[in-house]
Image (cartoon, grey):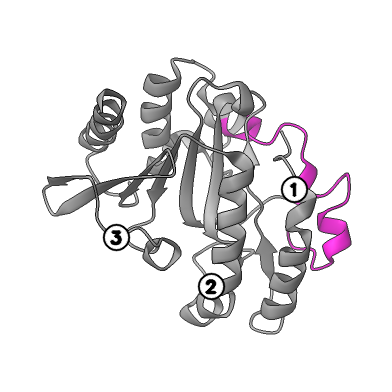
Amino acid sequence: MPIPQADKLKPLYRKLLEATTSQAKDLCTFFPQAGKNYLQAPCRILVVGKAVNGWCKGSTDSDIETLFSPEGIVNRPDEMIWINKLWQSTQSNKYNTRKSAFWRVIKGVSTQVCQKEDWWNWIAWNNLYKRAPSKGGNPSAKLRKGQLNLCKEILEKEIKFLNPNIIIFFTSGWENPFLAIETPSQEIIWGKYRLKKFQYQNRIYIQTVHPQGKNEKEHIKHILSLITQSRKD
């Protein structure tokens, strides 16, 4: 589902392309993705990563009109179905979401909160940094610095347009420059990791680590604990 009011982001994405094209070669551009039932979800969840690890065909185009065309990455008709398709994939040479700790933890949280087996259809996915190497990997420090201010402005508008009830940042502290919230209403420490919950403008913000290499059951349990407590408050 294309996100509401996507065209209002076009001027900012134009500036983003202009600011980053000269900084690195072979970049892809990410645009937030929403499941087909996201707007009807009883509890809208937006999950946020650091940056996309390679992206779909068409995302490497540096022409703003192409990116925002009816066939472009901004207007994909069923933006999250690929998660389930790749979850079922048996091809060893292709990315498999079932093997991704990131998506496994998101599934664990989403199925409990949304109470839907087709959980991917009921959530939205975003990234802090919109420009990243097309062949995968996080953007360099230089590339992050060159797009930070624009990405902050873009994220603020994307949150407004998507209007989530819960935002979960799986970003290991990368989210700090993006958020003006300072004092968490609740914290959970598990091992050497820390989860923080903020409530701001009738939304729940959860800051946590990227799931890779962590105890996934514990991670899911603690995120759900923060969400459950918020519903009681």
> SS at mark 3?
loop
- Taking the spot 38% from the left edge, 49% from the top edge, the residue there is 170
Per the model, the C-alpha gap separating discs 3 and 1 is 29 Å
The verdict on residue 70 being magenta is: yes
Q: Range of the magenta residues?
A: 57-83
Q: Residue 182 bears which disc, if any? A: 3
**In the depicted structure, whether residue 168 falls above or below residue 134:** above
Rate crowding at label 3 as few (under 14), some (14 to 19) or many (20 or more) other CA atoms within 10 Å.
Answer: few
| Secondary structure character of the magenta stretch overall | loop
Q: Which residue is mark 2?
A: 148
> SS at mark 1?
helix
Which badge, 2 or 3, comes first in the chain's sequence? 2
**In the depicted structure, whether residue 97 falls above or below residue 153:** above
Residue 89 visible to the viewer = no
Q: Amino acid at mark 2?
A: Leu
Quarter of the view holding residue 37: top right
Quadrant location of the N terminus in the rendered image: top right
Which badge, 2 or 1, comes first in the chain's sequence? 1
Where does residue 65 sit, x and y in percent of width and height?
88, 60
- Taking the spot 31% from the left edge, 25% from the top edge, the residue there is 231
Say which of marks 2 and 3 sits in front: 3
Q: Amino acid at mark 3?
A: Glu
Per the model, the C-alpha gap separating discs 2 and 1 is 20 Å
The verdict on residue 34 being magenta is: no
**In the depicted structure, whether residue 159 falls above or below residue 132:** above
> SS at mark 2?
helix
Q: Residue 6 bears which disc, if any? A: 1
Residue 180 visible to the viewer = yes
What residue occupies the far left of the structure in this picture? 191
Where does residue 36 sit, x and y in percent of width and height?
67, 26
